[in-house]
Structure formats: structure tokens, C-alpha cells
Image: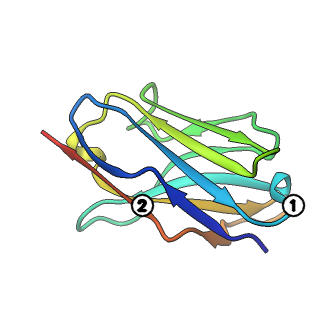
Amino acid sequence: QVQLVESGGGLVQAGGSLRLSCAASGRTFSSYAMGWFRQGPGKVREFVASISQSGGSPNYADSVKGRFTISRDNAKNTVALQMNSLKPEDTAVYYCAARFASAYEYGYWGQGTQVTVSS
């Protein structure tokens, strides 16, 4: 099992930047692909970005491509989401998630961190 705790959310003006971090417990962090998801007000949860167990093969939603960067540090059991050029439509609760290597779905989720982008 893995437990996830996000941090780094907050209020930022449009065009600004934030860096989210997710700390994972457990000694098998490198066995999990990691992802970031978000849920905006009145919206369903949506995929934002993912990264493989080794840190390669990053994937991004079209809406954040070129603005967000996902990275991980397996030595520190952390995954980060650098968010630049933020837009009001990026306002959401952001969730970190983990998917075990052989699993089809993300089975572990953090509690979420609020990101609010003002216009």
C-alpha cells in the first residue's frame, strides 16, 4: 500500500506559477506509476498528467500541455507538478494518485490540495 499527501496549493494570479508536491509513504514507491488529476467546481475529475515508474514517458492533458511539467524523485518518494502560465480555468482541487505497475486503474489517492487562479 501507499499513502499520498499533497501540498503546495494556494491562490495565484493568472499567469503565475505554483508547484505541487506529493509525498508517498512506503518502500515500493518506484513500483507505482504516478498521476495528477483535478476536479474543478461543478466538474468531474479529470486527468492532468502522469509519469511512469522510472520517471520517463510523461503524459499530459491537452489543456495543460506546454504549461505543466510532472516529475518524480524515487529516492525521496515524491512526485511534483510544476504549473506555469496558470489560467482561471485551472482552478480545481488537485489530487495525486498512484497506480501499481500491473494495475489498470489508479488505486491510491491523496486528499487533494486546492489551487485557485484569479483573473
Which of the pair 64/84 is nearer the observer?
84
Kind of residue at badge 1: Thr
Task: Say which quadrant the N terminus sits in.
Answer: bottom right
Asked which quadrant contains residue 66, the reply is top left
Q: Which residue is mark 2?
A: 113
Asked which quadrant contains residue 72, the reply is top right
Residue 81 in percent (x, y) is at 53, 41
Residue 20 in percent (x, y) is at 49, 46
Asked which quadrant contains residue 58, the reply is top right
104 to the left or right of 41: right
Q: Residues within 10 Å of mark 2 (few under 14, many from 20)?
A: many
Look at 39% across and 52% down and name the residue there: 9
Q: Residues within 10 Å of mark 1 (few under 14, many from 20)?
A: few
Which of the pair 57/14 is nearer the observer?
14
Residue 75 in percent (x, y) is at 82, 44
Kind of residue at badge 2: Thr
Q: Which residue is mark 1?
A: 28
Look at 68% across and 72% down and name the residue there: 107
> What's the CA distance linking mark 2 and mark 1?
24 Å
* Secondary structure of the residue carrying numbered label 1: loop
Residue 27 in percent (x, y) is at 87, 62
Look at 59% across and 54% down and name the residue there: 22
